[in-house]
Image: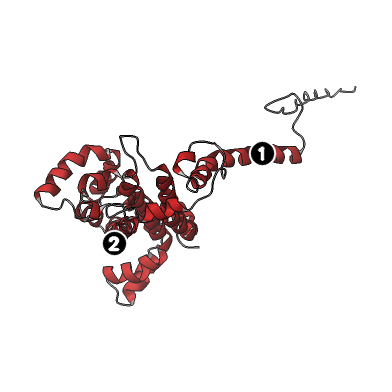
Amino acid sequence: MTTTTPTPRAAPPRRPRRLLFGNRPTRSPLLRALVKHSVMIITLVLMLYPLLWMVGASFRPDNQVFSTLGLFTGDFTTDNYRDGWTGGDQLNFSRFFFNSLTLTVLCIAGNLISCSLTAYAFARLDFRFKKTLFALVIGTLLLPYHVTLVPQYILFNQLGWVNSFLPLVVPKVMATDAFFIFLMVQFIRALPRSLDDAARIDGCGHWGIFRRVIVPLSIPAFGTTALFTFINTWNDFLGPMLYLTEPGTWTVSQGLASFLDATGQSAYGSLFAMSTLSLVPVLGFFIAAQKLLVEGIATSGLK
C-alpha cells in the first residue's frame, strides 16, 4: 500500500514594484538614485533661489532691483553696501551690529548658565515635588509667547528697564527657556552616575561634579543651546521692537525695518545689502557648531 504526498501549491508570483510615474518596474538602482538626486537638486535650487536672488539684488541699483528675476543681471554696483552701512546717524549699521552682538552674547551666557544649572538639579538631585516642578517647566512650552507680552511689558516698564537690554537678558538668566532645560536634562540623564560617584570619592560636591564632570561631557548640549539661542536672539524683532525704542539701542532686525518707508521711498538696495551682511554671523556660527548640534540633538552622551 502506497501513500501519496500532496504536492504543495506554488506561491503566486509577486508583482514587480512600479514607479510613481509609469508602469515599468523599478529594478535599476541607478535609475532610483538618479530620480532621488534629481528631486533633491530641484528642491535645493527652489530653496536657495530666494536667498541667491537677494544677494544678486543687493548689487543692483534701486531702480533695477525688481526689474528682473535673474540672479546676477543688470548694472553692478557696491553703493548699496556703502550707503546701507553708513547711511546716517540713525542708520549706522555698525551700531546695530554691535547692539545685536552684545545682546546675543549676553543671552547665550544667561541661557547656558541658568538652563544647565536647572537641568543638573532636575537630572541629578532628589528633592520634594521634583516631578511636579519639572512638569510645570515643560508645560510652559504650551504657553504662547504672545500671552505674556503685556504683563511683562508692564512689569519692565514699572522697573524702568525700557530702552535697555535688561528686559531681553534677565529672562534668560532666570532659566525661562524650557526647551533647553529639557534638552540638557535628557543629555545629563544619559551620563552614567558612576562618574558622579567617582568624583565624590575624590572629594567633589555637587558644584565640583557639575563643573568637572557634567559640563565637559555636555559640550554638545551646550553647543546646541548656544546655537539656537544665537539664531533666536539675532532674528528676534518683536522683543527689541517693544523694549528698544531709541535708535541708539536698535538691533539688526530693527535697522533692517528702518529701510522700509510707508510713503513708498524704501531703499530696497540697501535693505538687501544689509540683509546679506546680517546672514554672515548666523551662517558662520551654524557652520562652526553644526557638529555639536547633531550630537546635542541626538543626546548621545558618552561614546
Secondary element under disc 1, as helix, strand or loop, is: helix
Using the image, tell me which numbered label, if any, was put on residue 38.
1
Seen as rendered, the residue at the extreme right is: 1
**x then y, percent, for residue 121:** 27, 58
Using the image, tell me which numbered label, if any, was put on residue 141.
none
**x then y, percent, for residue 189:** 38, 56
Identify which residue is drawn at 34% across, 59% down.
94
Crowding at dot 2, Cα within 10 Å, few <14 / some 14-19 / many 20+, comes out as some
Seen as rendered, the residue at the extreme bottom is: 202
Above-or-below relation of 110 to 212 = above
Q: Nearer the viewer, residue 141 or 40?
A: 40
Q: Is residue 61 left or right of residue 197?
A: right
Above-or-below relation of 254 to 123 = above
Question: Does residue 65 appear anywhere in the picture?
Answer: no
Identify which residue is drawn at 35% across, 68% down.
196
**x then y, percent, for residue 302:** 47, 62
What amino acid is at disc 1?
A: Ser
Q: Nearer the viewer, residue 59 or 145?
A: 59
Q: Which image quadrant: the N terminus?
A: top right
Secondary element under disc 2, as helix, strand or loop, is: helix
Crowding at dot 1, Cα within 10 Å, few <14 / some 14-19 / many 20+, comes out as few
Q: Nearer the viewer, residue 32 or 92?
A: 92
**x then y, percent, for residue 52:** 53, 45
Q: Is residue 298 left or right of residue 103?
A: right
What amino acid is at disc 2?
A: Ile
Identify which residue is drawn at 27% across, 69% down.
207
Identify which residue is drawn at 70% across, 28% down.
19
- Which of the marked residues, 1 or 2, is nearer the chain's N terminus? 1
Quickly name the residue at label 2.
113
Query: Alpha carbon of mark 1 to alpha carbon of mark 2: how far?
Result: 45 Å
